[in-house]
Amino acid sequence: MSAFTLTKTRFREGVWEGVLMAAETGTPPDIQVTLRDQPVSGVTVTEMTPDMRDPGLRWLVQVPVPLEAVGDGVQTFLIVDATIDEVLESFTLISGEALGDDIRAEVELLRAELDMLKRAFRRHCLETT
């Protein structure tokens, strides 16, 4: 289980932003963002000034949405703590046809998480043989 919590603060002008909080002091994890199992470039993790009410360390995470992700359909971004291969947060862009409900977004998120689990399981099998 990750010692970090990532909470979305806003999504504006093509940049998703969130606050990464540590349970204990330390360095931020290796944050990786993927879209369709491909890494998203331009992700930044910047230390925020300490808050007296919250003694844990905090970082601002910014994820720019690449131009190729803008189009019809459902696009799911996974924000992962690469050190332990755990999903910290995800966000989905839906464009094009109006959806009666968001079931396609949920299925897309499940597919992305299943792909991540398959990779972790295969890696585990290779390491234990």
Image (spheres, grey):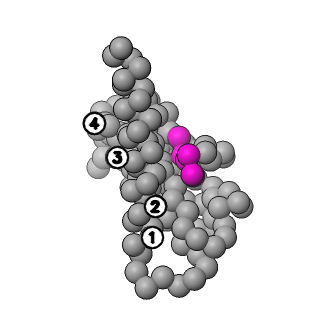
Q: Is residue 3 left or right of residue 102?
A: left
Residues marked 1 and 2 touching at CB (< 8 Å): yes
Q: Examine the image and state in which quarter residue 105 appears.
A: bottom left
Q: Nearer the viewer, residue 55 or 90?
A: 90
Q: Between disc 3 and disc 1, whose residue precedes?
A: 3
Q: Between disc 1 and disc 4, whose residue precedes?
A: 4
Q: Between disc 3 and disc 2, whose residue precedes?
A: 3
Residues marked 3 and 2 touching at CB (< 8 Å): no
Q: Position of residue 10 (x, y in %)?
A: 49, 65
Q: Nearer the viewer, residue 87 or 120?
A: 120
Q: Examine the image and state in which quarter residue 28 appears.
A: top left
Q: Residues within 10 Å of mark 2 (few under 14, many from 20)?
A: some
Q: Is residue 124 left or right of residue 63?
A: left
What kind of residue is marked 3? Answer: Thr
Mark-to-mark CA distance, 2 and 4: 23 Å
Question: Taking the image as drawn, is residue 2 in sight?
Answer: yes
Mark-to-mark CA distance, 4 and 3: 10 Å
Q: Residue 104, which numbered label?
A: 1
Mark-to-mark CA distance, 3 and 2: 23 Å
Q: Does the magenta stretch mainly form a helix, a strand or a loop?
A: strand
Q: Residue 1, which numbered label?
A: 4
- Highlighted magenta segment, given as a residue range: 32-37
Q: Position of residue 84 (x, y in %)?
A: 38, 31
Is 18 inside the magenta-drawn segment? no
Mark-to-mark CA distance, 1 and 4: 28 Å
Which residue is the site of mark 3?
A: 5
Viewer-nearest of discs 1 and 4 = 1
Q: Nearer the viewer, residue 9 or 66?
A: 66
Q: Residue 108, which numbered label?
A: 2
What kind of residue is marked 1? Answer: Arg
Viewer-nearest of discs 2 and 4 = 2
